[in-house]
Image (tube, grey):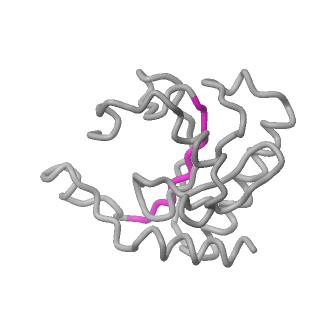
Amino acid sequence: MSYILSPKPSNCILCEKIAENRDRENYILYRGDKSCSMLNLYPYNNGHIMVVPYRHVPSLEQLDDEELLEMMNIVNQSLAALRKVMNPDGFNIGVNIGKAAGAGIVDHVHIHIVPRWEGDTNFMAVMAETRVIPELLEQTYEKLLKTLA
């Protein structure tokens, strides 16, 4: 919540990360022709992946059919990799369109894929406004990257 409510830079962080030639540092897992997948730097859970179109648009209806199809294919590819590497019990998949819907990056639409496990919530989120992520992003990235290769 602190990230969502904090002031944001005027430039788009997703566009910047996509444009840089530093996929490992930016946790970009896969690049397609029109979109890519990357780990979320502020994950809701271990393995939280975002599927991001290259085009900077605020909502899904502004994407063309090719972009939408590729994004959904990358969602499926990500699900398969997460199942193999992390063995989750389920997933939350969603798109937050607009600030009122909880979008942390309002102007660049993206799809969230959050692995879930039975009992993966605990008192830390309620009492300390903190999520406990038991694995470093680097470790998760390496596991997923190896599976996607």
Toward the front, the furthest residue is: 21
Q: Which residues are magenta?
A: 108-118
Q: Is residue 8 left or right of residue 25?
A: left
In front: 116, or 57? 57
Q: Is residue 119 left or right of residue 141?
A: left
Q: Quadrant of the N terminus?
A: top left
Measuring from the top left, give residue 46's x and y in whole percent. 44, 64
- Residue 23 figure quarter: bottom right
Q: Residue at x 59, y 55 (%)?
A: 38
Q: Is residue 112 magenta?
A: yes
Q: Is residue 63 left or right of residue 127?
A: right
In front: 19, or 90? 19
Q: Give the number of marks.
A: 0
Q: Is residue 63 above or below residue 121?
A: above
In front: 102, or 40? 40
- Residue 147 figure quarter: bottom right
Toward the right, the furthest residue is: 66
Measuring from the top left, give residue 47's x and y in whole percent. 51, 63
Q: Quadrant of the C terminus?
A: bottom right
Q: Residue at x 45, y 26 (%)?
A: 101
Q: Residue at x 19, y 58 (%)?
A: 124
Measuring from the top left, give residue 44's x and y in whole percent. 40, 53
Q: Residue at x 52, y 68 (%)?
A: 88
Q: Is residue 66 above or below residue 42?
A: above
Measuring from the top left, give residue 7's x and y in whole percent. 32, 30
